[in-house]
Image (tube, grey):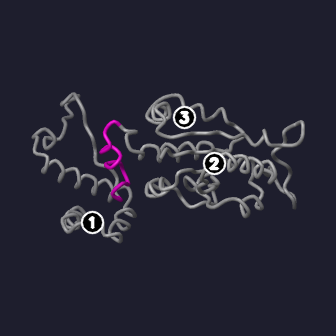
Amino acid sequence: MVMRFDVMSIFPEMFEAVHSGGVVGRALEKKRFELNIWNPRNYTSDPRKTVDDRTYGGGPGMVMMVEPLEKTLFAIHADLPKKGPVVLLSPQGQTFHQAMASDLLQYEQLTLVCGRYEAVDERFIQRSVDTQISLGDFVLSGGEIAAMAIIDAMVRLIPKVLGDQDSASQDSFMNGLLDCPHYTRPEIYDDFSVPEVLLGGNHAIIDGWRREQSLLATQLSRPDLIEAARKKGLLTDLDERFLKRIQS
């Protein structure tokens, strides 16, 4: 199965960044996933290719119209052997996280709708959208950057995309915690040395040190993740003893 992303956007040129290189670009070139961009302006009925209009009731900004969005979605579904969820990128959505990236990979296809302007007509959301996703508590000019971020996060988890699949499993948030610090050559830079434990070659000791550093980084920067990991049963007795030591 090859994961297929269908993206609805009035700025398809923005997605050239996906093709331009890096992990995701190479994965696309090797057909590890499929990406199709659909422009709602191509599914309008007027010469100006209008996709937005003024909001009923007055107020600032324009609203994306139902018809071009629905016609675009109909075209996408007509091209699909099996359709997956329709996701609107929106500040009203649930916050995207690593587990969500993994969960969405259970589908063979995902449609990402990139909103623009002030809003999307609520009738399209109620009739056609399965879920809404947000990157966080801030506002972007449109959903394109959010869509690319979601695609990037998901593609990294597809088998054979990363050179070493352990890279994905050891990323921040994969085990509920932030990642540990990493070092590379030179061993000493401006009197700042690589931690000695990493030079000894004892992988059991190194793994223990990395786990402690991961716990420390999470406790300092994101204590909410510690509590969430605790509730999910992701912390061992050894973890808890270490956390008590650093908190005291």
Residue 158: x and y in percent read 42, 45
Q: Earlier in the sequence, mark 2 or mark 3?
A: 3
Distance between the Cα atoms at labels 1 and 2? 42 Å
Q: Amino acid at mark 3?
A: Val
Q: In terms of secondary structure, where does tag 3 sit?
A: helix
Instruction: Read off the magenta span.
Output: 163-176
Asked if the residue under mark 3 is in contact with the one under mark 2, i.e. CB atoms within 8 Å, the reply is no
Number of numbered markers: 3
Find disc 3 in the rendering and name its residue. Answer: 18
Residue mark closest to the camera, 1 vs 3: 3
Identify whether 20 is placed above or below 97. Answer: above
Secondary-structure class at tag 1: loop
- Dot 3 alpha-carbon crowd within 10 angstroms: few under 14, some 14 to 19, many 20 or more: some
Task: Identify the residue under disc 2.
Answer: 80
- In the drawing, does residue 96 fall left or right of residue 198? right
Q: How far apart are the alpha carbons under marks 1 and 3?
A: 36 Å
